[in-house]
Image (cartoon, grey):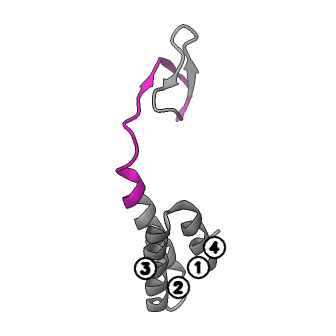
Amino acid sequence: MSASLEELSNRASDLFDPDLAKQVVQGMERDAASEPTGQPALESVATFFLGDRFYNRLPTGRIEGRINVVWNGPDSFVFVPDPNHPLWTGNGF
């Protein structure tokens, strides 16, 4: 389900500092005005800002541990954790 311009503007205000939120909202408004329905442009702008602004800020993550991949039939596999080497993410998530 797609969000409206108003919903995306509110999210921008919640997620970003005021200056960045203003830039995001202005970009969404510009793109919405250039599209007949507005919706594809809004999603495009939201994706651009979220991806571009946040991706480079993410810390490098780590996954440690072991899983066993067990064949369960045609095109079917089960991932079984190893109790002696449990999965762990070293990025705080």
Q: Nearer the viewer, mark 2 or mark 4?
A: 4
Quarter holding residue 93: top right
Near mark 4 (Cα within 10 A), the count class, few <14, some 14-19 or many ≥20, is: few
Circles 4 and 1: CB atoms closer than 8 Å: yes
Circles 3 and 4: CB atoms closer than 8 Å: no
Type of amino acid under label 4: Glu
Near mark 3 (Cα within 10 A), the count class, few <14, some 14-19 or many ≥20, is: some
Q: CA distance from mark 4 to mark 1?
A: 5 Å
Q: Nearer the viewer, mark 2 or mark 1?
A: 1
Type of amino acid under label 1: Leu
Q: Is residue 33 magenta?
A: no
Judge by depth and name the residue closer to the eye, 50 or 79.
50
**Numbered mark located on residue 7 in the image:** 4
- Among the two numbered marks 1 and 3 on one chain, the one whose residue lies closer to the N terminus: 1
Q: CA distance from mark 1 to mark 3?
A: 11 Å
Identify the residue position indicated by label 2 in the image. 38
**Numbered mark located on residue 27 in the image:** 3
Q: CA distance from mark 2 to mark 1?
A: 8 Å
| In the image, farthest residue toward the top | 84
Circles 2 and 3: CB atoms closer than 8 Å: no
Q: Is residue 6 left or right of residue 88?
A: right
Taking the spot 52% from the left edge, 21% from the top edge, the residue there is 87
Taking the spot 57% from the left edge, 74% from the top edge, the residue there is 9
- Among the two numbered marks 3 and 4 on one chain, the one whose residue lies closer to the N terminus: 4
**Numbered mark located on residue 5 in the image:** 1
Taking the spot 65% from the left edge, 68% from the top edge, the residue there is 1
Q: Position of residue 61 (x, y in %)?
A: 41, 34
Does the rendering let one see residue 74? no
Q: Which contiguous range is marked in magenta?
A: 52-77
Type of amino acid under label 3: Gly
Judge by depth and name the residue closer to the eye, 82 or 77.
82
Quarter holding residue 10: bottom right
